[in-house]
Amino acid sequence: MASTTATPKSAAQRSRKYMARRNKITMFLFVVPMLVVFLCMVILPSLQSLQLSFTDWDGISDTYDWVGFDNYVDMLTSGRFWNAVRNTLILGIGSAFVINLISLGMALLLDHIHHFSGFFRTIVYLPALVSAFIASTIWKYMLNYNFGAVNSMLRKAGLAGLTRDWLGDQHIVIWVLLFLICFTLGGNTTLIYLSNLQSVPQELVEAAKVDGANAWQVFRNVTWPMLAGSVTVNFTLSLIAGWAIFDQVQVLTSGGPGFVSETMAFFVYRVGFGEYRAGFGSAAAVILFVVVMISTVISNKFLRDREIQA
Amino acid sequence: MSHFTNDLKKGIAAAAAVATLFGMAACGSSSGGSSDAGGKTVIKFLYATGDDTWNGTVKALADAYNAQSDTAKVVPEPLPAGSDYATAMKTMDATGNWPAVVDMRDTVTYIEAGKLAPIPEEVISLLSDDAYAAYKDGNVYLVPAGANNGELGINIIYDKDYFKKHNLEVPTTYDEFIQLMKDIKKNGDVPLATAGGEVWPSDQLWKPLASAVFAEHSADGAGFWSDVKDGKASIEDLKEPLTELKDITDKYVLQGWQSTQDAQTTTLLVNHQAIMATSSAGLGRLKDINKVDPNYNAGMFIIPDENGRINVLKNAVGDSSQGLAISAQAKKDGKQYDAAVDFLKFYYSLDGANEIEKSGTIAPNIKDADQITRNESIPGSSDYYDLMKNPNLNWYVNETPWTEFSTFNSFFRQARIEMQTGQTSIDDLIAKTQAEFDKDIKG
């Protein structure tokens, strides 16, 4: 009897295993197209740029020479590179903080708006729909010193003393870039915060209010801990986007005046493509990759710990 | 039913995977040659967009060629907007998508990389002997796109009516140029607009100022940069023109130049925000101004040196030289090469030259140049033709036959802007430029 009941069971198990394997293969085949594209377009070129970083390849010739660590030494002893690092830190960390602060504020406001909420959400999200390239081009015209809208309005308002060469003054250009980046990148961040805010259990909020908590205490002790996951995601995404800022610099300042507004991503592009130093540019790209990895791991570790506590 | 669904899913997934692999393989290279429905060989002519006049010239020439050719069709292909030249070329190269005819920059780099094909005698023979130069391997890879008047196109465009109204004269020495700017400033106007929003237009003010030093090194050698390489000159020799550049920038240039783009100086002129503007577009800038404001009475001159000489770089030879080239990829294809050669023969024919002139660009120096119908309809163009006959014109050479010169030149341009904006001193600029030259060119 035992043997007669065991046989159909094991046949069913075998069939289930077979089906599971078939499903896995099918799922893998669905993934293959993207995997192939990703391997060919991202992973292999990235590995190749590690190899190229030890060469003097100009990006055009069929041949190159190995130069050991010369590219890395040249870069780390160049003031231009450290200026790009400084700018990347300002724009990367600065934009991550500013965007998250403003986006959280906007999300809290939008969460409390009950009339025309769709309209206001659309307005807040709208800048994120415009590509960084197009938005930067529009800003470039608006900020032109001699006929841009911003300076023209200031002159007409009798505030000619406040007019500046917003994109040409080396003392302020990096802060102008920071402002513009925050302006265009905030839409997605706001959206993530808003969706998280709307999933905060209302019974917890009500309970806190019943216990006599004021608005700030409700936010500090109930809402904020519940937003920990969003903060991790948003901060990490903003930080990575900040490290890789390129479009805005390319369109608005081309790294100038001089070298003053070059970022690491722009530096990689400029030396690798514009100056025919693909080997040197690859070395810069490798350093940028390491910086992004380290900063992402550190920020994730810090923010994840907070999530656990929450 | 379940089996059918699973098989269908697997089929779709497998087909997608195979299609992707084929798609990826197809991305690897693209065919160099193609034919249109009429059996003509279609070739691409990649050109760098700059001023509107040059865009119009390329279109007019391609249309005229296509109308008379039974064998080939030329498709003008502008460099994508917003991309810089080097990036566009590298993208083309990486995708194996070289056009047959290329508006070339950074030439030595591409010759050395084997990307260009020699231009045959049947094309070269149509040109004046001084309009081209052979590379060190004896082949000619580059022929002029427009009049090979060196850098005569780098000049100052000015408001003739303003000059007349205030009894101002075109300067004949450098001191007179400075005095002219002082006089304009005294009138409460801004003397000069220039552009630093992109890096390359910074040459427009710099080169005329440095030309006296460059010319000194031209008399008995290959020029200034060769002398720096050989230790007979140094960047320190440029201190005087660098000082002049800083002085002019600080005292006479319209504010906001750092973020102004080259084409925007036309707007600044016709809006009378500045009386003069730097340009490197030759007649093209005059034509653009005329298009924007037909009533604007523009003229042009070149900043003279202290002794009244107008020093102009003759034919650029080396990595900074520009002109038309045929790609090695077209040569490999055969048909593409033949079509490119046929197009260039038209380009340097009398018909082609007349087409170029009509569109507002000065035709290249062809052997039949005296038969070309010159276009003198553009206001101010007589100034350009007069410059060519000016007895004080002093042609100089300044060869840069090193593939690394583009790297150095890019750095020098940015470093100059850095100095002009006061981020570094002239001495710092000289020291770091010398170090960069030693690393890139000597090293």
Image: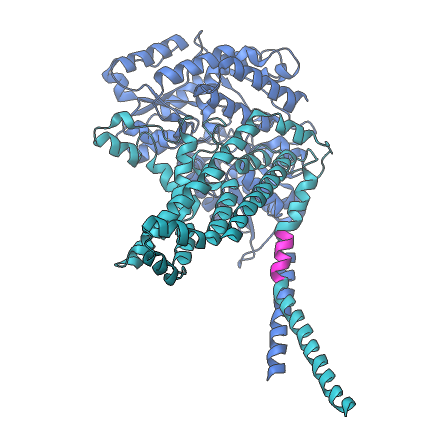
Chain colours: A cyan, B blue
Residue B303 part of the magenta-drawn span: no
Q: Locate residue B40, reporting x and y percent.
A: 55, 54
Whether residue A257 sits left or right of residue B319 in the image: it is left
> In percent of the image, x 60 and y 32: which residue is there?
B107
Q: Nearer the viewer, residue A260 or B134?
A: A260
Q: How many marks?
A: 0
Q: Nearer the viewer, residue A251 or A160?
A: A160
Whether residue B236 sits left or right of residue A63 in the image: it is left
Q: Is residue B297 above or below residue A197?
A: above
Q: Locate residue A224, reporting x and y percent.
A: 42, 51
Q: Quadrant of the C terminus of chain B?
A: top right
Magenta segment boundaries in residue numbering? A33-41
Q: Nearer the viewer, residue B6 or B67?
A: B6
**Which of the 4 image quadrants contains residue A112?**
bottom left
> In percent of the image, x 52 and y 40: which residue is there?
A243
In the displayed orientation, state which residue is furthest to the bottom.
A1
Residue A35 part of the magenta-drawn span: yes
> In percent of the image, x 37 and y 61: which residue is there?
A202
The answer to whether residue B373 shows anywhere in this view is no
Whether residue B380 sits left or right of residue B113 in the image: it is left
In the displayed orientation, state which residue is furthest to the front.
A211
> In percent of the image, x 64 and y 46: which residue is there?
A46
Secondary structure mostly seen in the magenta stretch: helix
In the displayed orientation, state which residue is furthest to the right.
A3
The answer to whether residue B335 shows anywhere in this view is yes
Q: Quadrant of the N terminus of chain B?
A: bottom right
Q: Locate residue A93, reporting x and y percent.
A: 48, 38
Q: Locate residue A19, reporting x and y percent.
A: 67, 77
**Which of the 4 image quadrants contains residue B11?**
bottom right
Whether residue B234 sits left or right of residue B55 in the image: it is right
Q: Nearer the viewer, residue A111 or B203?
A: A111
